[in-house]
Image: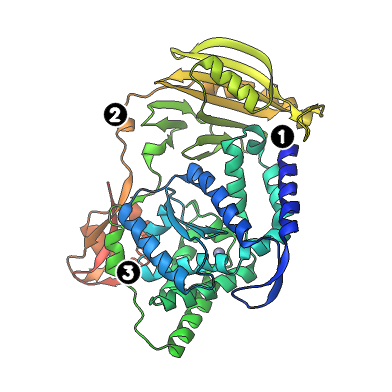
Amino acid sequence: MKMKFQISILTGLVAAGMLAGCSKNPVTGKKEIIFMSKEKEIALGAESHPSIVATMGIYGDKNLQSFISEKGMAMAKISHRPDLPYQFFIVDSPVVNAFAVPGGYVYFTRGIMAHFNNEAEFAGVLGHEIGHITARHSARQQTSQIFGQVGLLAGMVLSETVRGLAEQTQQALGLLLLSYSREHETESDKIGVDYSSKIGYDAHQMADFFGTLKKISEKSGQTIPTFQSTHPDPGDRQNKVNKLATQYQTAHPAKYNVNRDAYLRKIDGIIYGTDPKQGFVENNQFYHPELKFQFPVPSGWQYENSPAQFQMAAKDGKSMMLFALAEGKSLEEAAQTIVKNYSLQVLENDKTTINGNQAIVMVSKQVAQSQNGQAQAQPAENTLQVATWLIQYGGNIYAIHGVAAMPNFAGNLGQFKSVAQGFKSVSDPNILNRQPERIRIKTVQRDGTLKDALKDSNQPDNKLDELAIINGMALSDKVTKGMLVKTLGK
Ligand SMILES: [Zn+2]
């Protein structure tokens, strides 16, 4: 399967190569060889979008959505490529990130929306992301990075195990993880200054947001992914962007807006951090309050929860487990679908019950297939062995897979079993009714410091440092009566 996937990427590369031509870059004006036509760019965006939505979900806030679409379209109009079918989305992820996919798809996480402190900061990042699209960074990137991307995908056990949605997801993530070069980032920062200034915002605020990013990354343990890791040092960018903003405003004197209060009122109530409704891990258990089940997470394992699946892996990377909804009306049908979709050869198949729920347990190995669909012999260390538990519960059928290469499988089976056999219902109201934290905008009651204002709003001491970052301030910064600040509440 791994082989099949690589081949499809290489085929894609050849197809892209056939469309390659020489054309003028809309931003730099330089002639360059590009490997992607405009149609191909749009098709790529349209292809990736469903997997991005499946992986992260869309954050359903109509007011905030219409705000970003309105600003996005205004900026698209003054950009170097106003003719693309731009679309703007807020994805339901706590991570602080924004990203763009060729063809005009731009995404902000609810995590980054919660961290902006005014419209101008948002506009700067919007300009930066639109800049990646208009300067065709992804298209240019494709030529130099495609082999790295193949390596990245091949390194993920998951993509070899579960096809369909998971495969699409990997393709989408492959795109997201494509790191732009520093040169491209610097170019996009400059475009961000130009575009956000052109629609009337003060780009010095964009520089300030790099200060916030720097603080988030310094506070380790916080989810701070691609936006940070693939981008140049935020401190450095902050200085450069500040200079560019001053240059722009000197050359084009006008009133440049910040719109702090207007922005803060728009994000009042936005969910902050993980949303327990989508499942959460606590005391080595994964809980899903909406679907009312739980199962153990082996201690020390790393995990990732998304709307489509929960995956976890041992630190040594030699075994992983995946939990997802199974397709089929009965356990037997679900088992057949899995065997077919994942090209499995079943070695054992038994009926059982798990904590009172009907279940099927299967042990199988994955059959490697060549491009023409023929089964292929391959060495044991490259063959994946899979233990699958299908469990009927609450009107759904769930699949738990434990996966390891054949030589490591027996040694991990005990761990896989204890996870699957720990699947059970949840009735604890403390788990079922768990509410997410939200940003609550409060009006400062008296002149003082940010710390005073947060304490006046009954914010706990252990959250003060985090709240300072969310507010884009230091705790000792002065605030005045009537000012708005972000606090956290249920
Ligand atoms: Zn970037």
Where 296 sits versus 2, above or below?
above
For this view, does 374 lie left or right of residue 86?
Answer: right
Callout in the foreground (2, 3):
2
User: Which residue is nearer to you in this view: 487 or 321?
Assistant: 321
Q: Name the residue under label 2.
A: 429
Q: Name the residue under label 1.
A: 1
Quadrant position of the N terminus in the picture: top right
SS of the residue under disc 2: helix
Answer yes or no: do the residues labelled 1 and 2 have beta carbons within 8 Å? no
Where 87 sits versus 58, above or below?
below
Answer yes or no: do the residues labelled 2 and 3 have beta carbons within 8 Å? no
- Position of residue 362 measured from the top left corner of the image (x, y, whole percent): 61, 17
SS of the residue under disc 1: loop
Q: What residue type is labelled 2?
A: Pro
Q: What residue type is labelled 3?
A: Ser
Is residue 300 shown to the viewer in this render?
no
SS of the residue under disc 3: loop
Report the residue at 28% width, 67% height from top. Answer: 262
Report the residue at 19% width, 70% height from top. Answer: 481
| Mark-to-mark CA distance, 3 and 1 | 56 Å
Residue 265's image quarter? Answer: bottom left
Q: Give the mark nearest the N terminus, 2 or 3.
A: 2
Say whether mark 3 is within 8 Å of ligand 1: no
Q: Looking at the rendered structure, which numbered label has been put on residue 476?
A: 3
- Position of residue 383 measured from the top left corner of the image (x, y, whole percent): 75, 29
Where 259 sits versus 314, above or below?
below
Instruction: Count all numbered tags in the image, as a single digit.
Output: 3
Q: Give the mark nearest the N terminus, 1 or 2.
A: 1
Residue 157's image quarter? Answer: top right
Callout in the foreground (1, 2):
1
User: Which residue is nearer to you in this view: 458 or 318?
Assistant: 318
